[in-house]
Image: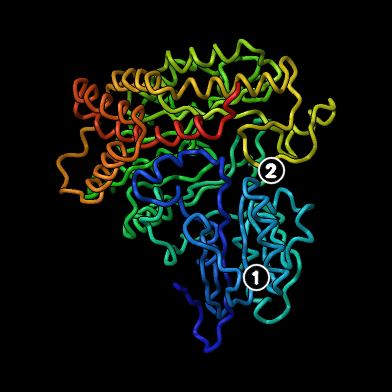
Amino acid sequence: MKTKRYGSGKHFKRIYLIAPKHPENFWSMQGTVNILGAKTLMPNAALATLMALTPSDVNVEYVLCDENISKLNWNMSCDLVAVTGATLHNKRIHNLCRGFRQRGVPVALGGTYASINSDQCVDLADYLFVGEAEYTWPAFLREWTRGKAKPVYRQETYIDLKDSPAPDWSLIVADDYININVQTCRGCPHGCDFCDVIQYVGRSPRTKSVLQVMAEIRQAHEIGARTVFFSDDNFLADKAFTEQLLAAIIGWNTAQSRPLSFSTQITVDIADDEKLLRMCADARFSVLFLGVETTRRASLEEVKKVHNLKYDIFERISRISRYGIMPFLGMIVGFDHDDESVFDELYDFFTRTSSPIVGISLLNAPRHTPLYDRMEKEGRLLGDDFSGEWQLYTNIIPKLISRDELLRRYCRLFKKLYQPELFSERLQGWLRHVEYFSPLYGQKKFDFKQFSHGVRMIFFFLVLATPAERGVFFKSLIETWKINPKLLRRAFTFLAQYPHFYDFVRKKLPERI
């Protein structure tokens, strides 16, 4: 059992840190896990940050359990269990808290779920943390080790993100994860009315310093990361900071014999600045998750996502693709202006933009959002049971289409997208769009880990994949070589994700639609 001690005393209080297991239907970018040998997408940065926040005058010992990596030990000898998680994990969070308290172990609970739904969590834990923990966790540790801890620790104001330390990754193994995550900012200036993120982190962007972020990137590189995911809700929230950071990344990454790749969540506004797009490509960004949501103007106006309306969305997506950066499109169906015809419109958009990877969700109304209030006023809420998953269920009664028809057409569209021949056509179309190849990365030394990933992928598609997946893989490699051999790495990025989505639409979506 791997542990990490803080302090210099003889006696240490042990804290069992737990990252809850993702629900079975959690699909976001998990597809590369089995192929590349990793076990899950990324580690829990919140728990690693709690470790780094430990004051030097407190004697504690940490044990970590990421349930996506290892089995939970209900009989762990410890003085406290600390649980964090998002709304997505709410059922497991309740099980964990109740299970350990029934065994007589006190529980500390924090994170986005506990903060946004604090009224539902008051009796769930011995110590409840509401809001960001950079200031409250050190205060709690000092009081708890002295037997004077309070039942609730509430951060009333937003913290200065420059006070947030680099996560302590000493209890993880980098090879267990596809990405190591780094957070550069919190807060988003936009006011999309279905988004509960701004309820937690606010609308005024707060950033770490460029020096802080670069230190975390170097740390990720040192522990063996291949890809860094910037876990910001909007990587472009502070454009001036983003530009400074990209410049620093380029300067550092081009000097590495083993350069990193990067990915993040970002608004489509990135497509409006050719300089920033080129910088993303020069920094080796491989994937940008884009909240496109819908192609219907009325729907975007409906949910206050007006920044998506500034320029033509087709040209925006095409411009990102021309720089060789994979646009992972996040789409939603079920808006008040969505009728049956929206599904054909969306498929036509995916085809015209040659977008290989698309994630489609059903519109839901999380608690405490403007959308929730609006649906409640109109009597269109189905209970108060939003689970954090945006697939296969909606807590909203649609306006222009029945819930059954919405789900049926949603499943049909999702399945059609990942039919092998249609996916392959979009992939080849996307590869033909690529125009920019960064000149900053010359011949690097042989990368054994990248080579082993390639071997794993070939083994998967040769031995473990279905015939349809195998056909997509080898056909795509042959066609990619014909288009431009320089594009093989990008093709591998798409192909590594395809089996997960193909598996999702075949096994998780209802058969009878």
Location of residue 439 in the rendering, given as x and y in whole percent from the top left corner: 20, 33
Please name the colour scheme applied to the rendered image: rainbow
Q: What type is the residue that disc 2 sits on? A: Gln
Residue 219: assigned label: none
Residue 301 visible, this angle = yes
Location of residue 229 in the rendering, given as x and y in whole percent from the top left corner: 43, 45
The residue labelled by disc 2 is 199
Residue at 73% x, 18% y is 402
Q: Quadrant of residue 316?
A: top left
Mark 1, secondary structure of its residue: helix
Q: Nearer the viewer, residue 75 or 1?
A: 75
Residue 248 visible, this angle = no
Q: What type is the residue that disc 1 sits on? A: Ala
Location of residue 292 in the rendering, given as x and y in whole percent from the top left corner: 53, 25
Q: Quadrant of the N terminus?
A: bottom left
Q: Is residue 31 left or right of residue 206?
A: left
The residue labelled by disc 1 is 139
Q: Earlier in the sequence, mark 2 or mark 1?
A: 1
Q: Mark 2 and mark 1 in contact? Answer it, CB < 8 Å.
A: no
Q: Residues within 10 Å of mark 2 (few under 14, many from 20)?
A: some
Q: Residues within 10 Å of mark 1 (few under 14, many from 20)?
A: some
